[in-house]
Image (cartoon, rainbow, N blue to C red):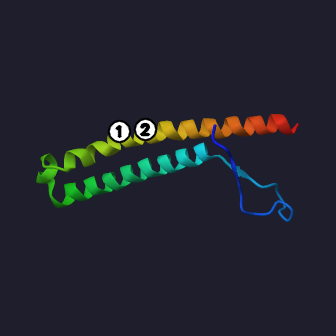
Amino acid sequence: MAKPTRSTGTPRYAAESSVTFNRTERVLAFMVGGIIGLGLLCFIATIVMWLVAPDARASMPWPVVLAIPLYGFPIGMLLLFVLLGVVWTRRARENRTSH
């Protein structure tokens, strides 16, 4: 598992203990954001294409642009569930060790 990195705040003066950020969680979060963001952009581009040039559906690159939301949104949701599982597992371990 990836080594956690400490936050930049000093724990001596902070009201709460410093939070650890796991590299795996950060990568998963950026992957979820990137895939869902790209899917939304392609979805908006598809709507604009249908309004402006409805005959261009069969020409390239529109089949690819149409396919990205179809595959991107389910993959993004699966990665979101994986991220939630990783975070919940880490927090459960931290709670077990703190008591």
SS for callout 1? helix
Picture quarter containing residue 1? Answer: top right
Q: Position of residue 24 (x, y in %)?
A: 59, 43
Residue 97 position, x and y percent, is: 83, 36
Which class describes the residues within 10 Å of circle 1: few (<14), some (14-19), or many (20+)?
A: few
User: At 18% across and 61% down in the image, what residue appears?
Assistant: 52
Residue 66 x/y as whole percent: 26, 46
> How many circles with numbers are drawn on the protein?
2
| Amino acid at circle 1 | Tyr
Residue in the picture at 54% in, 47% down: 27
- Disc 1 target residue: 71
Q: Residues within 10 Å of mark 2 (few under 14, many from 20)?
A: some
Where's residue 48, x and y in %? 25, 59
| Residue placed most toward the observer, 12 or 74 | 12
Q: Is residue 70 left or right of residue 20?
A: left
Image-based side of 99 in relation to 59, left or right: right
Amino acid residing under circle 2: Ile
Left or right placement of residue 47 versus residue 9 in this view = left
Q: Tag 2's secondary structure?
A: helix
- Image height check: is 41 above or below 68? below
Rendered-image quadrant of the C terminus? top right
Q: State yes or no: discs 1 and 2 in contact (Cβ < 8 Å).
A: yes
Q: CA distance from mark 1 to mark 2?
A: 6 Å
Q: Which residue is depicted at the point 20% across and 54% down?
A: 50
Q: Label 2: which residue?
A: 75
